[in-house]
Image (cartoon, rainbow, N blue to C red):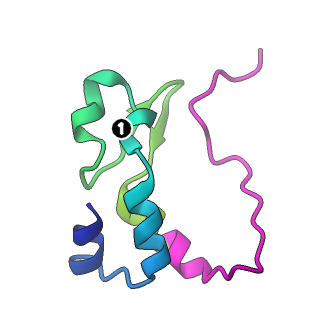
Amino acid sequence: MVERLRRHYHIRDERVLAAMGRIPRHLFVPEALQSHAYGDHALPIEFNQTISQPYIVARQTELLEVTKDDRALEIGAGSATKPPC
């Protein structure tokens, strides 16, 4: 997956590529789809949500140009947890 991000999509930020390589994407999808977790596509997760295509995650993160001094607050990105009743 990381090599595809680097070669096909030209993701250049080594910090982004390293993070993408460390994240165990298969743990975030249903067991039946775990073999597809590192493919180049979004996958369904619980509650009609999806885990984004790896390229989209990498590109958005790269475009942020985050430095070690930056902080980020992610709101509304989904987490596959049960929504409040």
Query: In the figure, is residue 78 to the left or right of 23?
Result: right
Q: Hey, what amino acid is under mark 1? A: His
The x, y position of residue 34, in whole percent, is 29, 33
Q: Nearer the viewer, residue 55 or 17?
A: 17
Query: In the figure, is residue 37 to the left or right of 44?
Result: left
Q: Which residues are magenta?
A: 60-85
Q: Nearer the viewer, residue 42 or 69?
A: 69
Q: Residues within 10 Å of mark 1 (few under 14, many from 20)?
A: some
Q: Is residue 81 magenta?
A: yes
The x, y position of residue 60, in whole percent, is 52, 70
Q: Which residue is mark 1?
A: 26
- Residue drawn where x is 22% and y is 35% of the image: 35
Residue 18 to residue 69: above or below: above
Going by the picture, which residue comes out furthest to the top? 85
**Magenta region's main secondary structure?**
loop
- Residue drawn where x is 61% and y is 78% of the image: 64
- Residue drawn where x is 70% and y is 79% of the image: 68
Q: How many marks?
A: 1
Q: Is residue 55 magenta?
A: no
The x, y position of residue 76, in whole percent, is 70, 46
Query: In the figure, is residue 30 to the left or right of 77?
Result: left
The x, y position of residue 77, in whole percent, is 63, 48
Q: Could you tell me which secondary element the residue under label 1 belongs to?
A: helix
Which quarter of the figure is the C terminus placed in? Answer: top right
Which quarter of the figure is the N terminus placed in? Answer: bottom left
Tell me which corner region of the image, top left, top right, bottom left or bottom right, holds residue 71.
bottom right
